[in-house]
């Protein structure tokens, strides 16, 4: 009888707690849920890179690995033709891990080998995004990032952050800088590292008046991708993203859950929404 009474009490407590938990959801969580619901309905049959991003984003928003496995099977059928760059292979690898799969054996392909095949002299692929995504994918798979890759990344830093081309002679970009901060932290570089702290200060100095970010800073209107990346980078650095920055990203969300590139330009709502879900959800890369 005591066991039965305890079980009934637990059920009653859970029933009472459930509405409270729903009421406790904040604006970021509600934005994440709306965006994830839209992605769930609208990403089947998307290009392979976006399918991979959707798996990672939905995992960040709380979808179970089991719920994501049908998406991973679909990705496995189209990924080989897509994952010809280090960054492409890295996206597929991170999606496999997020859905509980093995990136070394996804539909008969080894996507970790595809990443490492494009490594030389400390660099993965051709761009900073190849570099960052590859480092994140290796950590997602439990593999170490070579010290030479960390050194090469640090050497490529410009006057403030990093350029897309991973060259100190090209213009530093906010979204690229944020992604590399996230990747270097995942690779084990401590948040107190002087270069990371300096790059973070430069990144934050690019904030516009409403708290958002654009790829090339300078007070330009808020863009979804760079603002999402900054939010994740700050979490990677152990900092709480400012409320104004999170609100600036939420202001780009439409009623149907999609996110615009900027207020004036919808751009690719799929890409912007994929970027925003992890930021709304309180997560960062990699997702497991």
Image: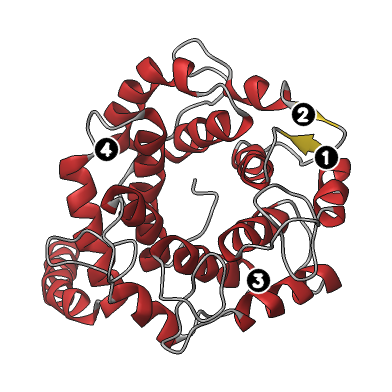
Q: Residue at x 69, y 32 (%)?
A: 125
Looking at the image, do the residues carrying marks 2 and 1 touch, with CB atoms under 8 Å apart?
yes
| In the rendered image, the vertical position of residue 164 relative to residue 33, given as above or below | above
- Residue 231, position as x, y percentages in the image: 50, 70
Looking at the image, do the residues carrying marks 2 and 4 touch, with CB atoms under 8 Å apart?
no
Q: Residue at x 61, y 66 (%)?
A: 236
Q: CA distance from mark 3 to mark 2?
A: 26 Å
Q: Which residue is mark 3?
A: 237
Q: Quadrant of residue 282?
A: bottom left
| In the rendered image, the vertical position of residue 108 relative to residue 55, given as above or below | above
Mark 2 residue crowding within 10 angstroms, few (<14) / some (14–19) / many (20+):
some
Q: Is residue 26 visible?
A: no
Front disc: 3 or 4 = 3
Secondary structure of the residue carrying tag 1 is loop
Front residue of 237 and 213: 213
Q: Which residue is mark 2?
A: 119
Secondary structure of the residue carrying tag 4 is helix
Q: Which residue is mark 1?
A: 146
Q: Residue at x 67, y 61 (%)?
A: 181
- Residue 116, position as x, y percentages in the image: 72, 26
Q: Quadrant of the N terminus?
A: bottom left
Q: Which residue is mark 4?
A: 67
Q: CA distance from mark 2 to mark 1?
A: 10 Å
């Amino acid at each position: 009888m005591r066991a039965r009474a305890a079980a009934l009490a637990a059920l009653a407590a859970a029933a009472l707690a459930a509405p409270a938990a729903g009421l406790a959801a904040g604006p970021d969580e509600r934005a994440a849920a709306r965006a994830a619901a839209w992605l769930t309905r609208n990403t089947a049959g998307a290009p392979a890179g976006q399918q991979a991003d959707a798996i990672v984003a939905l995992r960040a928003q709380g979808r179970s690995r089991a719920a994501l496995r049908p998406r991973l099977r679909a990705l496995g059928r189209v990924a080989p033709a897509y994952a010809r760059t280090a960054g492409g292979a890295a996206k597929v690898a991170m999606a496999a891990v997020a859905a509980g799969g093995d990136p070394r054996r996804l539909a008969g392909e080894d996507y970790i080998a595809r990443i490492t095949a494009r490594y030389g002299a400390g660099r993965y692929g051709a761009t900073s995004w190849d570099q960052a995504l590859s480092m994140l994918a290796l950590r997602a798979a439990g593999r170490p990032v070579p010290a030479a890759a960390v050194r090469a990344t640090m050497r490529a830093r410009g006057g403030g952050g990093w350029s897309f081309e991973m060259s100190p002679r090209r213009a530093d970009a906010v979204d690229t800088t944020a992604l590399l901060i996230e990747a270097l932290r995942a690779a084990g570089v401590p948040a107190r590292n002087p270069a990371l702290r300096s790059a973070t200060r430069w990144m934050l100095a690019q904030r516009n008046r409403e708290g958002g970010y654009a790829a090339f800073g300078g007070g330009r209107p808020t863009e979804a991708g760079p603002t999402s990346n900054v939010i994740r980078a700050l979490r990677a650095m152990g900092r709480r993203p400012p409320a104004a920055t999170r609100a600036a990203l939420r202001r780009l969300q439409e009623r149907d859950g999609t996110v615009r590139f900027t207020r004036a330009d919808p751009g690719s709502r799929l890409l912007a929404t994929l970027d925003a879900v992890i930021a709304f959800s309180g997560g960062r890369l990699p997702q497991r």
